[in-house]
Amino acid sequence: MKGMYLVKPGVIVSKDVPLPSLTPNEVLIKVKAVGICGSDIEYFKSGRIGNFVVESPLILGHEVSGEVVDIGRDVTSLRIGDRVALEPGIPCGKCVFCRSGRYNLCPDIRFMGTPPIDGAFREYIAYPETFTYKIPDDLSFEEAALLEPVSVGIHATRRADIQPGDVVAILGAGPIGLVTLQAARIKGAADILVTDLADYRLEIAKALGATNVVNVGKKNPSCLTDYLKACDVVIQTATGLEALAQSFQFVKRGGRIVLVGHLPSSQVPIDPNLLIVEELNLFGSFRYVNTFPIAIKLVSAKLINTKILISKTFSLADLQMAFKYALENSHNYIKIMIKL
């Protein structure tokens, strides 16, 4: 089979590799669709994200769907021919976080496309039955590949504890911001502001139900002042330090800030006295936990639209070209999909 390896920053090479063998609890999946995530782009560009460094050839990709073509002898919930989506993190199942139901915090989780674990830009994957989810026939493989970012948005809104009637600001209108917007609407948010630097993305946010959208790279419109110190919840999905500062400008006293987007520096400007005197609640949101079943239901029921996020499609053979396009057109697309 073909596997697409990042051999150094900016260079992906196709290699012929053996078809993976199955353990008794695994299924063999023919990959059908893989989304390119921002983390994939960062690895492609620089070869690292924080302490995670690509030190040997690595297959990227973790937003994936496909078809079951073989099953291990102990597999009971899946059959050959089933259409599936994969949850890309496999926790140890033994630590205190796994046993308490917060397996996203497992320190030994094996996450697709994160060094040194190979990801999904290949023709076949052997994967544990436990983290392989059957999808309904009315869900395309492309839509199903985006259940992973949908899960990020669901988890973020759970961390935010959004209540019916809440005023919410979502900072960043990339794929995560746009699925978080939709999850916040489902939670009952009455007024949702979305900010970004790209008008193209903000137009889609408006189409998906944002009450107001603001390009914060331009002169701020008067409506922005309506949200200053007025939001019950602020969810930061953008990756700039400016978004972190804006979080504190928008959140009202006693409100909740949820940080989702990874920031470029560990040194960030947070005033601890502001947290104290305004009784602010500051939360981190890391990936997701126990979200894939609900994500499948919401996307299948058309309550969350992932199809609208797909801006451009490439073949697996053109993966290098797809990454180059992503780097050169960062403000002109939402999600690039690799279709096999």
Image: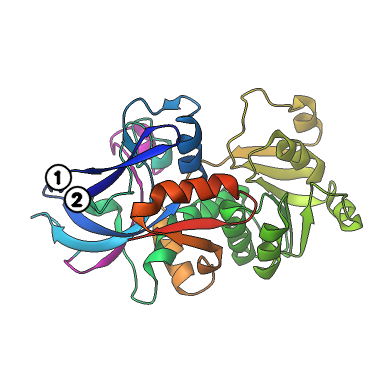
Q: Quadrant of residue 98?
A: top left
Crowd band around label 1 with a 10 angstrom C-alpha radius: few (<14), some (14–19), many (20+): few
Which residue occupies 21% across, 62% down? Answer: 68
Crowd band around label 2 with a 10 angstrom C-alpha radius: few (<14), some (14–19), many (20+): few
The x and y percentages for residue 9 are 44, 32
Q: Mark 2 points at which residue?
A: 1
Query: What kind of residue is marked 2?
Result: Met
Given residues 115 and 10, the one toward you in this image is 10
Point out the stretch of residues depicted in magenta.
79-102
Up-down relation of residue 303 to residue 26 (above or below) = below
How far apart are labels 2 and 1 at the CA level? 6 Å
Instruction: Give the numbered dot on residue 31.
Output: none
Q: In which quarter of the image is residue 110?
A: top left
Given residues 66 and 237, the one toward you in this image is 66
Given residues 223 and 297, the one toward you in this image is 223
Given residues 103 and 262, the one toward you in this image is 262
- Residue 220 visible to the viewer: yes
Decide: marks 2, 1 in contact (CB < 8 A)? yes
Which residue occupies 56% across, 54% down? Answer: 175
Q: Name the residue under label 1.
A: 18
Up-down relation of residue 73 to residue 82 (above or below) = above
Which residue occupies 71% across, 50% down? Answer: 233
Q: What element carries label 1?
A: loop
